[in-house]
């Protein structure tokens, strides 16, 4: 690490530096930190962008580095030029855990300006669903781990339950435009989000929202129709 004189120029080299920040030998971690301070932050945006899809999930698994190491990695990923490259990648179809990476990127508000474009133009349904959910529900959520939940404490029966952290998303957008796009989306996952939004706002339906609700009554997905039926029952009981 002390012999390196240039910044990482490919995703493999970026990942290698990050792993050395988590090395089991303290001297190696110290040398890696010194290198990262001056070179990781100046690495090419394309190399950082591609490595981010792999490194973001790793930030919750690596435990030997200190807060400064984690901060350097995250500040590198959240550079404006890197975020621009990431937006381009999220708009295109690609393999891997893209949804997980997007949720982790949304831990900070730096990427919020791209959410609306992803909601409307992303090729992957998973990306559109996460972006639309963040807009309509005004929150970003990401997986943080599992907790043990007792089913029957007497007999020692328990189950693992996923835990999520969240933050508020506060950006200006035309709610009805996003809702309409969600209701007309090709993916039932996205249309379910539109139905969930209507459930939460069933007591304050505007004429346009009521029109969207009527259209979803005839949705080809049973999970969407069941949500609309729930709204009808609740409104009849009111």
Image: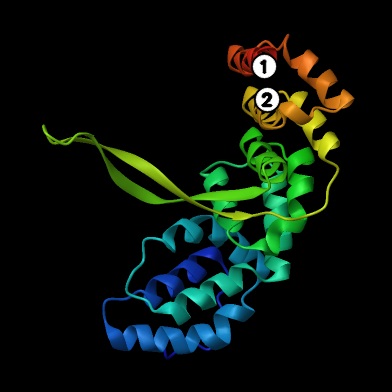
Q: Could you tell me which quadrant the N terminus lies in? A: bottom left
Q: Is residue 64 above or below residue 84?
A: below
Measured as percent of width and height from the top left, residue 198 is found at: 71, 27
Of the numbered discs in the image, which one, if any, rests on residue 132?
A: none
Left or right: residue 147 versus residue 168 is: left
Most foreground residue, 54 or 69: 69
Discs 1, 2 touching: Cβ within 8 Å: yes
- Specify the quadrant of the image occupied by residue 50: bottom right
Q: Is residue 63 above or below residue 148?
A: below
Res 1 seen here: no
- Specify the quadrant of the image occupied by residue 195: top right
- Specify the quadrant of the image occupied by residue 203: top right
Secondary structure beneath label 1: helix
Left or right: residue 70 versus residue 137 is: left
Q: Could you tell me which quadrant the C terminus lies in? A: top right
Most foreground residue, 42 or 169: 169
Furthest-front residue in view? Answer: 238
Left or right: residue 150 versus residue 82 is: left
Residue to which mark 2 is pinned? 195
Q: Earlier in the sequence, mark 1 or mark 2?
A: 2
Residue to which mark 1 is pinned? 228
Residue positioned 73% across, 68% down in the render: 81
Residue positioned 85% across, 35% down in the render: 177
Residue positioned 36% across, 83% down in the render: 29
């Amino acid at each position: 690490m002390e012999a390196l004189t240039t910044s990482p120029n490919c995703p493999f080299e970026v990942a290698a530096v990050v792993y050395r920040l988590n090395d089991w030998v303290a001297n190696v971690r110290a040398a890696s930190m010194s290198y990262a301070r001056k070179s990781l932050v100046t690495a090419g945006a394309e190399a950082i962008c591609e490595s981010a899809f792999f490194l973001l999930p790793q930030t919750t698994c690596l435990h030997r580095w200190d807060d400064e190491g984690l901060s350097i990695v995250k500040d590198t990923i959240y550079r404006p030029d890197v975020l621009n490259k990431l937006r381009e990648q999220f708009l295109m179809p690609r393999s891997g855990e893209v949804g997980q990476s997007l949720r982790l990127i949304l831990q900070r508000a730096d990427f919020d300006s791209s959410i609306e474009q992803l909601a409307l133009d992303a090729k992957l349904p998973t990306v559109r669903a996460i972006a639309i959910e963040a807009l309509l529900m005004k929150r970003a959520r990401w997986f943080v781990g599992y907790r043990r939940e007792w089913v029957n404490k007497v007999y020692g029966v328990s189950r693992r339950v996923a835990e999520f952290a969240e933050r508020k998303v506060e950006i200006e957008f035309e709610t009805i435009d996003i809702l309409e796009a969600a209701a007309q989306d090709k993916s039932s996952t996205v249309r379910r989000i539109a139905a969930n939004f209507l459930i939460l706002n069933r007591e304050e339906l505007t004429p346009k929202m009521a029109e969207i609700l009527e259209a979803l009554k005839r949705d080809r997905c049973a999970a969407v129709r069941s949500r609309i039926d729930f709204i009808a029952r609740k409104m009849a009981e009111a």
